[in-house]
Amino acid sequence: MDRAAGPRSASLGNFQFGAVATETIEDALLHLARQNEQAVREAVGSHGHFRFRETRFVEFIFLLSEQWCLEKSVSYQAVEILERFMVKQAEAICAQAVAQLGDSEWTEAQNWRARKEQLCSKFILRLVSCVQLASKLSFHYKALGYQYTKEELLESELDVLKSLDFQINRSTPLEYVETLLEVLGYNGCVVPATRLHATCLSLLDLVYLLHGPVYESLLRSAVGSATPSQLQGEQFSPVQEDFMLLAVGVIAASAFVQSHACWSQVVRHLQSITGIASESIAEFSYAVLTHGVGVSPTAVPPLQAAWAPALLSPPAAQRVGHRLQRPPASLAE
Protein backbone atom coordinates (compact mmCIF):
# COMPACT_ATOMS: atom_id res chain seq x y z
CA MET A 1 0.00 0.00 0.00
CA ASP A 2 1.25 3.43 -0.90
CA ARG A 3 1.51 5.59 2.20
CA ALA A 4 3.41 8.56 0.77
CA ALA A 5 0.28 10.61 0.17
CA GLY A 6 -0.97 11.05 3.71
CA PRO A 7 -0.86 10.03 7.37
CA ARG A 8 -0.77 6.39 8.29
CA SER A 9 -4.49 6.23 9.13
CA ALA A 10 -5.46 7.31 5.63
CA SER A 11 -5.44 3.83 4.09
CA LEU A 12 -7.44 1.98 6.75
CA GLY A 13 -10.39 1.79 4.42
CA ASN A 14 -8.28 -0.15 1.91
CA PHE A 15 -7.67 -3.03 4.30
CA GLN A 16 -9.65 -6.07 3.12
CA PHE A 17 -10.78 -9.16 5.00
CA GLY A 18 -11.98 -12.41 3.48
CA ALA A 19 -9.63 -12.28 0.50
CA VAL A 20 -7.28 -15.05 1.69
CA ALA A 21 -7.83 -18.80 1.51
CA THR A 22 -8.75 -20.61 4.72
CA GLU A 23 -5.66 -22.83 4.57
CA THR A 24 -3.42 -19.78 4.35
CA ILE A 25 -5.06 -18.20 7.39
CA GLU A 26 -4.66 -21.44 9.37
CA ASP A 27 -0.96 -21.61 8.50
CA ALA A 28 -0.47 -17.95 9.40
CA LEU A 29 -2.21 -18.34 12.75
CA LEU A 30 -0.19 -21.43 13.68
CA HIS A 31 3.02 -19.68 12.66
CA LEU A 32 2.17 -16.72 14.89
CA ALA A 33 1.28 -19.09 17.74
CA ARG A 34 4.68 -20.80 17.52
CA GLN A 35 6.47 -17.44 17.48
CA ASN A 36 4.43 -16.32 20.46
CA GLU A 37 5.20 -19.48 22.44
CA GLN A 38 8.93 -19.03 21.81
CA ALA A 39 8.85 -15.37 22.87
CA VAL A 40 6.98 -16.22 26.07
CA ARG A 41 9.41 -19.04 26.92
CA GLU A 42 12.38 -16.74 26.36
CA ALA A 43 10.85 -14.14 28.69
CA VAL A 44 10.72 -16.57 31.62
CA GLY A 45 13.43 -15.61 34.09
CA SER A 46 14.24 -12.34 32.32
CA HIS A 47 14.91 -9.04 34.08
CA GLY A 48 11.35 -7.82 34.62
CA HIS A 49 12.42 -4.34 35.72
CA PHE A 50 14.25 -3.63 32.44
CA ARG A 51 11.38 -2.14 30.46
CA PHE A 52 11.52 0.63 27.87
CA ARG A 53 7.95 0.67 26.52
CA GLU A 54 7.43 3.96 28.31
CA THR A 55 4.68 6.32 27.18
CA ARG A 56 7.08 9.11 26.13
CA PHE A 57 9.18 6.74 23.99
CA VAL A 58 6.15 5.11 22.35
CA GLU A 59 4.56 8.50 21.70
CA PHE A 60 7.78 9.75 20.10
CA ILE A 61 7.86 6.74 17.76
CA PHE A 62 4.16 7.03 16.90
CA LEU A 63 4.44 10.74 16.11
CA LEU A 64 7.61 10.24 14.11
CA SER A 65 6.01 7.43 12.10
CA GLU A 66 2.94 9.55 11.42
CA GLN A 67 5.07 12.51 10.35
CA TRP A 68 6.90 10.23 7.92
CA CYS A 69 3.63 8.65 6.71
CA LEU A 70 4.80 5.16 7.62
CA GLU A 71 2.66 2.06 7.81
CA LYS A 72 0.92 1.40 11.10
CA SER A 73 2.89 -1.81 11.61
CA VAL A 74 6.18 0.12 11.42
CA SER A 75 5.36 1.92 14.66
CA TYR A 76 4.83 -1.29 16.61
CA GLN A 77 7.86 -2.96 15.04
CA ALA A 78 10.04 0.03 15.96
CA VAL A 79 8.84 -0.05 19.57
CA GLU A 80 9.61 -3.76 19.84
CA ILE A 81 13.06 -3.38 18.24
CA LEU A 82 13.88 -0.54 20.62
CA GLU A 83 12.65 -2.58 23.60
CA ARG A 84 14.75 -5.63 22.73
CA PHE A 85 17.83 -3.55 21.94
CA MET A 86 17.69 -1.48 25.12
CA VAL A 87 17.07 -4.56 27.29
CA LYS A 88 20.15 -6.19 25.82
CA GLN A 89 22.16 -3.04 26.46
CA ALA A 90 20.92 -2.87 30.05
CA GLU A 91 21.74 -6.53 30.66
CA ALA A 92 25.23 -6.00 29.27
CA ILE A 93 25.80 -3.07 31.66
CA CYS A 94 24.64 -5.17 34.60
CA ALA A 95 26.82 -8.09 33.59
CA GLN A 96 29.84 -5.80 33.33
CA ALA A 97 29.11 -4.32 36.73
CA VAL A 98 28.80 -7.77 38.29
CA ALA A 99 32.16 -8.74 36.85
CA GLN A 100 33.80 -5.59 38.20
CA LEU A 101 32.18 -5.37 41.64
CA GLY A 102 31.36 -8.97 42.45
CA ASP A 103 27.96 -10.46 43.11
CA SER A 104 28.01 -9.63 46.81
CA GLU A 105 28.38 -5.90 46.17
CA TRP A 106 26.05 -5.62 43.21
CA THR A 107 22.34 -4.99 43.65
CA GLU A 108 20.56 -4.29 40.39
CA ALA A 109 17.66 -2.43 41.96
CA GLN A 110 19.99 0.03 43.70
CA ASN A 111 22.45 0.61 40.86
CA TRP A 112 20.16 0.47 37.84
CA ARG A 113 19.14 4.14 37.88
CA ALA A 114 22.70 5.40 37.97
CA ARG A 115 23.90 3.06 35.25
CA LYS A 116 20.88 3.78 33.08
CA GLU A 117 22.48 7.15 32.37
CA GLN A 118 25.03 5.30 30.24
CA LEU A 119 22.24 4.45 27.82
CA CYS A 120 20.85 7.98 27.51
CA SER A 121 23.53 9.85 25.62
CA LYS A 122 22.66 8.23 22.27
CA PHE A 123 19.08 7.24 23.03
CA ILE A 124 17.38 9.46 20.45
CA LEU A 125 19.83 8.29 17.81
CA ARG A 126 19.07 4.66 18.72
CA LEU A 127 15.34 5.35 18.62
CA VAL A 128 15.60 6.88 15.16
CA SER A 129 17.69 3.92 14.02
CA CYS A 130 15.00 1.52 15.21
CA VAL A 131 12.36 3.40 13.22
CA GLN A 132 14.64 3.44 10.18
CA LEU A 133 15.25 -0.30 10.48
CA ALA A 134 11.54 -0.95 10.87
CA SER A 135 10.55 1.23 7.94
CA LYS A 136 13.18 0.11 5.39
CA LEU A 137 12.71 3.53 3.83
CA SER A 138 14.97 6.43 2.92
CA PHE A 139 16.46 8.70 5.54
CA HIS A 140 14.09 11.13 7.23
CA TYR A 141 16.35 12.35 10.02
CA LYS A 142 16.45 15.99 8.87
CA ALA A 143 12.81 16.45 9.92
CA LEU A 144 13.75 15.69 13.50
CA GLY A 145 15.94 18.70 14.08
CA TYR A 146 18.81 16.53 15.35
CA GLN A 147 22.15 16.97 13.64
CA TYR A 148 23.02 13.36 12.85
CA THR A 149 25.10 12.62 9.82
CA LYS A 150 24.28 9.79 7.47
CA GLU A 151 27.37 7.97 8.71
CA GLU A 152 26.28 8.27 12.35
CA LEU A 153 22.86 6.87 11.49
CA LEU A 154 24.35 3.96 9.58
CA GLU A 155 26.74 3.15 12.42
CA SER A 156 23.90 3.32 14.93
CA GLU A 157 21.70 1.03 12.84
CA LEU A 158 24.57 -1.43 12.58
CA ASP A 159 25.01 -1.37 16.37
CA VAL A 160 21.32 -2.19 16.82
CA LEU A 161 21.47 -4.97 14.24
CA LYS A 162 24.56 -6.54 15.79
CA SER A 163 23.12 -6.36 19.28
CA LEU A 164 19.99 -8.20 18.09
CA ASP A 165 21.94 -10.68 15.94
CA PHE A 166 20.20 -9.17 12.91
CA GLN A 167 16.90 -10.69 14.10
CA ILE A 168 14.62 -7.65 13.79
CA ASN A 169 11.81 -8.92 11.59
CA ARG A 170 9.54 -10.42 14.25
CA SER A 171 5.77 -10.44 14.15
CA THR A 172 4.10 -7.48 15.84
CA PRO A 173 0.85 -7.52 17.86
CA LEU A 174 -0.86 -5.95 14.83
CA GLU A 175 -0.22 -9.13 12.82
CA TYR A 176 -1.84 -11.19 15.57
CA VAL A 177 -4.85 -8.87 15.66
CA GLU A 178 -5.38 -8.86 11.91
CA THR A 179 -4.92 -12.62 11.57
CA LEU A 180 -7.43 -13.29 14.34
CA LEU A 181 -9.88 -10.82 12.78
CA GLU A 182 -9.57 -12.74 9.52
CA VAL A 183 -10.41 -15.97 11.34
CA LEU A 184 -13.36 -14.33 13.10
CA GLY A 185 -14.68 -13.27 9.73
CA TYR A 186 -14.52 -16.81 8.40
CA ASN A 187 -16.23 -18.07 11.56
CA GLY A 188 -19.19 -15.79 11.00
CA CYS A 189 -18.62 -13.29 13.79
CA VAL A 190 -21.64 -11.00 14.07
CA VAL A 191 -19.47 -7.89 14.30
CA PRO A 192 -17.86 -7.21 10.87
CA ALA A 193 -14.08 -7.48 10.89
CA THR A 194 -13.74 -4.15 9.10
CA ARG A 195 -15.56 -2.39 11.94
CA LEU A 196 -13.48 -4.12 14.57
CA HIS A 197 -10.26 -3.39 12.70
CA ALA A 198 -10.44 0.39 13.00
CA THR A 199 -11.26 0.21 16.72
CA CYS A 200 -8.52 -2.35 17.30
CA LEU A 201 -5.93 -0.01 15.82
CA SER A 202 -6.95 2.79 18.18
CA LEU A 203 -7.00 0.52 21.25
CA LEU A 204 -3.70 -1.11 20.32
CA ASP A 205 -2.14 2.35 20.16
CA LEU A 206 -3.56 3.07 23.61
CA VAL A 207 -2.16 -0.15 25.06
CA TYR A 208 1.28 0.77 23.75
CA LEU A 209 1.04 4.31 25.07
CA LEU A 210 -0.30 3.11 28.44
CA HIS A 211 1.70 -0.10 28.55
CA GLY A 212 2.88 0.39 32.12
CA PRO A 213 -0.51 1.16 33.71
CA VAL A 214 -2.33 -1.58 31.76
CA TYR A 215 0.08 -4.37 32.68
CA GLU A 216 0.54 -3.10 36.22
CA SER A 217 -3.21 -3.37 36.78
CA LEU A 218 -3.18 -6.90 35.35
CA LEU A 219 -0.31 -7.82 37.66
CA ARG A 220 -2.09 -6.44 40.71
CA SER A 221 -5.20 -8.36 39.76
CA ALA A 222 -3.23 -11.55 39.17
CA VAL A 223 -1.44 -11.54 42.53
CA GLY A 224 -4.32 -10.01 44.47
CA SER A 225 -2.17 -7.25 45.93
CA ALA A 226 -1.82 -3.53 45.34
CA THR A 227 1.95 -3.79 45.86
CA PRO A 228 3.36 -6.83 44.03
CA SER A 229 6.84 -7.92 44.96
CA GLN A 230 9.82 -7.75 42.60
CA LEU A 231 9.73 -11.56 42.29
CA GLN A 232 6.07 -11.48 41.31
CA GLY A 233 6.86 -8.83 38.72
CA GLU A 234 9.62 -10.96 37.23
CA GLN A 235 7.35 -14.01 37.14
CA PHE A 236 4.79 -11.88 35.31
CA SER A 237 7.27 -10.85 32.58
CA PRO A 238 6.23 -13.60 30.11
CA VAL A 239 2.69 -12.21 30.08
CA GLN A 240 4.04 -8.88 28.79
CA GLU A 241 5.58 -10.71 25.83
CA ASP A 242 2.43 -12.70 25.03
CA PHE A 243 1.20 -11.01 21.85
CA MET A 244 -1.58 -13.56 21.35
CA LEU A 245 -3.07 -12.60 24.71
CA LEU A 246 -2.65 -8.91 23.86
CA ALA A 247 -4.40 -9.41 20.51
CA VAL A 248 -7.45 -11.24 21.90
CA GLY A 249 -7.75 -8.65 24.67
CA VAL A 250 -7.70 -5.76 22.20
CA ILE A 251 -10.21 -7.48 19.89
CA ALA A 252 -12.56 -8.25 22.78
CA ALA A 253 -12.34 -4.66 23.99
CA SER A 254 -13.06 -3.43 20.46
CA ALA A 255 -16.07 -5.73 20.25
CA PHE A 256 -17.41 -4.21 23.46
CA VAL A 257 -16.99 -0.70 22.05
CA GLN A 258 -18.72 -1.69 18.82
CA SER A 259 -21.55 -3.82 20.24
CA HIS A 260 -22.13 -4.59 23.93
CA ALA A 261 -24.61 -7.33 23.09
CA CYS A 262 -22.13 -9.26 20.94
CA TRP A 263 -19.17 -9.02 23.32
CA SER A 264 -19.65 -12.43 24.95
CA GLN A 265 -19.99 -14.15 21.58
CA VAL A 266 -16.76 -12.60 20.33
CA VAL A 267 -14.95 -13.70 23.50
CA ARG A 268 -16.19 -17.27 23.01
CA HIS A 269 -15.02 -17.19 19.39
CA LEU A 270 -11.57 -16.03 20.49
CA GLN A 271 -11.37 -18.74 23.14
CA SER A 272 -12.28 -21.37 20.56
CA ILE A 273 -9.68 -20.13 18.10
CA THR A 274 -6.72 -19.61 20.46
CA GLY A 275 -7.41 -21.84 23.46
CA ILE A 276 -6.98 -18.86 25.81
CA ALA A 277 -9.44 -19.01 28.71
CA SER A 278 -12.42 -16.71 28.32
CA GLU A 279 -11.77 -15.32 31.82
CA SER A 280 -8.28 -14.22 30.79
CA ILE A 281 -9.61 -12.60 27.62
CA ALA A 282 -12.24 -10.78 29.67
CA GLU A 283 -9.68 -9.67 32.27
CA PHE A 284 -7.37 -8.25 29.63
CA SER A 285 -10.17 -6.54 27.70
CA TYR A 286 -11.43 -4.99 30.92
CA ALA A 287 -7.95 -3.57 31.61
CA VAL A 288 -7.83 -2.12 28.10
CA LEU A 289 -11.28 -0.58 28.42
CA THR A 290 -10.60 0.82 31.88
CA HIS A 291 -7.34 2.54 30.94
CA GLY A 292 -8.24 3.28 27.34
CA VAL A 293 -11.80 4.59 27.38
CA GLY A 294 -12.67 4.73 31.08
CA VAL A 295 -15.30 1.97 31.16
CA SER A 296 -16.53 1.11 34.66
CA PRO A 297 -16.78 -2.51 35.90
CA THR A 298 -20.59 -2.39 35.94
CA ALA A 299 -20.72 -1.42 32.25
CA VAL A 300 -19.11 -4.66 31.07
CA PRO A 301 -21.48 -7.63 30.77
CA PRO A 302 -20.47 -10.62 32.93
CA LEU A 303 -19.01 -13.48 30.96
CA GLN A 304 -19.26 -16.02 33.74
CA ALA A 305 -19.63 -15.92 37.49
CA ALA A 306 -16.26 -14.29 38.02
CA TRP A 307 -13.34 -12.91 36.02
CA ALA A 308 -10.63 -14.98 37.65
CA PRO A 309 -7.29 -14.11 36.00
CA ALA A 310 -6.34 -17.79 35.95
CA LEU A 311 -3.82 -17.59 33.14
CA LEU A 312 -2.28 -14.34 34.31
CA SER A 313 -0.95 -15.47 37.67
CA PRO A 314 2.10 -17.58 38.46
CA PRO A 315 2.60 -20.44 38.01
CA ALA A 316 0.07 -20.14 35.20
CA ALA A 317 2.35 -17.64 33.42
CA GLN A 318 4.81 -20.49 32.95
CA ARG A 319 2.33 -22.46 30.85
CA VAL A 320 1.17 -19.48 28.80
CA GLY A 321 3.04 -20.88 25.78
CA HIS A 322 0.73 -23.91 25.63
CA ARG A 323 -2.56 -22.11 25.08
CA LEU A 324 -2.84 -22.88 21.38
CA GLN A 325 -2.40 -26.64 21.35
CA ARG A 326 -4.48 -27.54 18.31
CA PRO A 327 -5.10 -26.24 14.79
CA PRO A 328 -7.82 -23.58 14.57
CA ALA A 329 -10.45 -26.15 13.65
CA SER A 330 -13.14 -23.57 14.34
CA LEU A 331 -12.43 -22.16 10.91
CA ALA A 332 -14.59 -24.92 9.55
CA GLU A 333 -17.45 -24.25 11.94
Image (tube, rainbow, N blue to C red):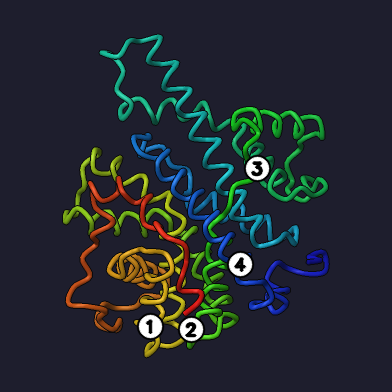
Residue designated by label 2: 189
The numbered mark, 2 or 1, whose residue comes first in the sequence reads: 2
Residue at 82% over, 64% down: 4
In the image, residue 78 sits, relative to residue 230, either above or below, namely below
The numbered disc on residue 312 is none
Asked if the residues shown at circle 2 and circle 1 are in contact, with their CB atoms under 8 angstroms apart, the answer is yes
- Which one is closest to the eye, mark 3 or mark 1? 1
Residue at 72% over, 74% down: 10
Residue designated by label 3: 130
Three-letter code, disc 3: Cys
Residue at 39% over, 53% down: 212
Q: What element carries label 2?
A: loop
Disc 3 to disc 4, how far (Cα)?
Answer: 34 Å
The numbered mark, 3 or 4, whose residue comes first in the sequence reads: 4
Q: Nearer the viewer, residue 44 or 154?
A: 44
Three-letter code, disc 4: Glu
The numbered mark, 4 or 1, whose residue comes first in the sequence reads: 4
Disc 3 to disc 2, how far (Cα)?
Answer: 37 Å
Residue designated by label 1: 265
Q: Is mark 3 on a helix, strand or loop?
A: helix
Three-letter code, disc 2: Cys
Q: Residues within 10 Å of mark 2 (few under 14, many from 20)?
A: some
Asked if the residues shown at circle 3 and circle 4 are in contact, with their CB atoms under 8 angstroms apart, the answer is no
Q: Is mark 4 on a helix, strand or loop?
A: helix
Residue 98's x, y, as percent? 37, 15
Q: Residues within 10 Å of mark 4 (few under 14, many from 20)?
A: few
Residue 16's x, y, as percent? 68, 77
- Which one is closest to the eye, mark 3 or mark 2? 2
Disc 2 to disc 1, how far (Cα)?
Answer: 8 Å
